[in-house]
Image (tube, grey):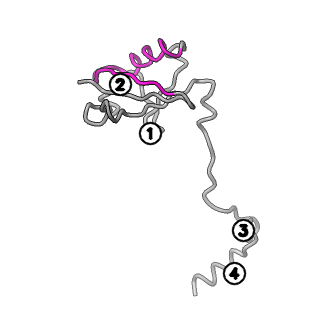
Amino acid sequence: MEVFLKIEHRKTSFFTEVKESTTVLELKRIVQGIVNRPPKDQLLFKDDQLLEERKTLRDCGFTSEVAKAQDPAIVTLAFREDAFLLLHASPFSCPLIGGVLKNGLDFERDLEHVMQ
């Protein structure tokens, strides 16, 4: 069965149609014909998950039911030299510095208040 993919790299997108049995490496060769970059320099992602070259698109979750012509599945393309841009840190909480939160709140006082 055919799957329809929208391949995105930064602000550029292009579409391709391939079989579910196509391997990720074969997809990279198709992409090579468009972006003129060898497969070894390409990183392909589905939902922030790196796709393994030896797997088929079906193995990666791309099926004709989820990758339709009117609603193609999205594959994100990055290049090896840009890989560090994919890493980003998001703070989950305010760091504790000497019993006082960085934002000026007193951790022990506020904890006692919550525990009462």
Residues at marks 1 and 3, CA–CA distance in whole angstroms: 34 Å
User: Which residues fall within the magenta stretch?
Assistant: 13-35
Residues at marks 1 and 2, CA–CA distance in whole angstroms: 16 Å
What kind of element bears circle 4?
helix
Q: Give the residue number, with chain letter if any, for mark 3.
A: 101
Q: Which residue is drawn at 59% across and 36% down?
A: 86
Q: Residue at x 42, y 34 (%)?
A: 74
- Between discs 1 and 2, the one toward the N terminus: 1
Q: Give the residue number, with chain letter if any, for mark 2.
A: 55
Residue type beneath disc 3: Leu
The quarter in which the C terminus is drawn is bottom right
Q: Residue at x 30, y 32 (%)?
A: 68
Nearer the observer: mark 4 or 1; the answer is 1
Residue type beneath disc 4: Arg
**93 lies left or right of 100:** left
Residues at marks 4 and 1, CA–CA distance in whole angstroms: 42 Å
Q: Position of residue 81 (x, y in %)?
A: 63, 24
Q: Give the residue number, with chain letter if any, for mark 1.
A: 47
Q: Give the residue number, with chain letter if any, for mark 4.
A: 109
